[in-house]
Amino acid sequence: MCLKKENKNLFTSGLILGLGLLGAIDGILFHQLLQWHHMILSPNIKLEIFTDGLFTSLFSALLIWGGVKIFQDSRHNKLGSSWKIFLGGIFVGGGTFNLVEGIINHHILQVHRVKPLAENPLVYDLAFLVIGFFLFIIGILIKRLETNA
């Protein structure tokens, strides 16, 4: 079923916010609180902190963009009101963040692992992808609940 323009805007805003939110969770939890890794693993701590700062700038920009998009769309009466569409977008965006970041950074570019000093770091990398996959699927299912209603 096709979404109305207002609901597409709401879903897109949720998706953008979901990307930023999972980036924030990743940066705060894994980079700062647990200190498992930095954006780029290097013997140069200044480079590690600098790349973490770039990462923080990126997810912060996504959070701002999502908020501004909601404000602009609501000002022009082009924003839907379904919490299921919005929540679905957040979950899809969050899942997309984990899948893209995990596949590109952990597996293709290998710039860092989720927990590089673990006995088996691959387990943590795969768990990161599984979480992303489930977040994505949950988001699609929540969105479908609304579009099929």
Image: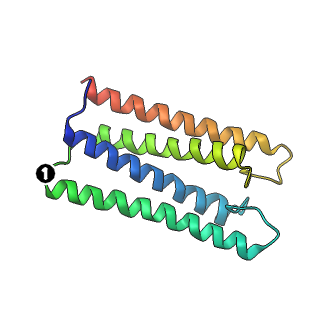
Q: Answer yes or no: is residue 82 visible.
A: no
Instruction: Tell me where residue 91 appears, x and y as whole percent.
Output: 44, 41
> Measured along the vertical axis of the image, is residue 60 above or below residue 125?
below
Residue at (57%, 63%) from the top-left corner? Answer: 55
> Measured along the vertical axis of the image, is residue 6 above or below residue 73?
above
Instruction: Tell me where residue 79 appears, x and y as whole percent.
Output: 20, 48
Secondary structure, mark 1, is loop
Residue at (64%, 42%) from the top-left corner? Answer: 103
Residue at (28%, 57%) from the top-left corner? Answer: 69
Q: Residues within 10 Å of mark 1 (few under 14, many from 20)?
A: few
Taking depth in this image into account, of 42 and 116 the one nearest to the observer is: 42
Q: Answer yes or no: is residue 57 visible.
A: yes
Q: Is residue 73 left or right of residue 143?
A: left
Instruction: Tell me where residue 89 appears, x and y as whole percent.
Output: 38, 42
Q: Is residue 85 left or right of residue 91?
A: left
> Dividing the image into 4 quarters, which one contains the N terminus?
top left
- Residue underneath mark 1: 77
> Measured along the vertical axis of the image, is residue 148 above or below residue 133?
above
Taking depth in this image into account, of 103 and 33 the one nearest to the observer is: 103
Instruction: Tell me where residue 135 appears, x and y as whole percent.
Output: 50, 38
- Report the amino acid beneath label 1: Asn
Q: Is residue 95 left or right of residue 108?
A: left
Residue at the front extreme, as displayed:
109
**Res. 147 image quadrant:** top left
> Dividing the image into 4 quarters, which one contains the C terminus?
top left
> Measured along the vertical axis of the image, is residue 44 above or below residue 107?
below
Residue at the left extreme, as displayed:
77
Residue at the right extreme, as displayed:
119
Q: How many marks?
A: 1
**Res. 44 image quadrant:** bottom right
Residue at (37%, 32%) from the top-left corner? Answer: 142
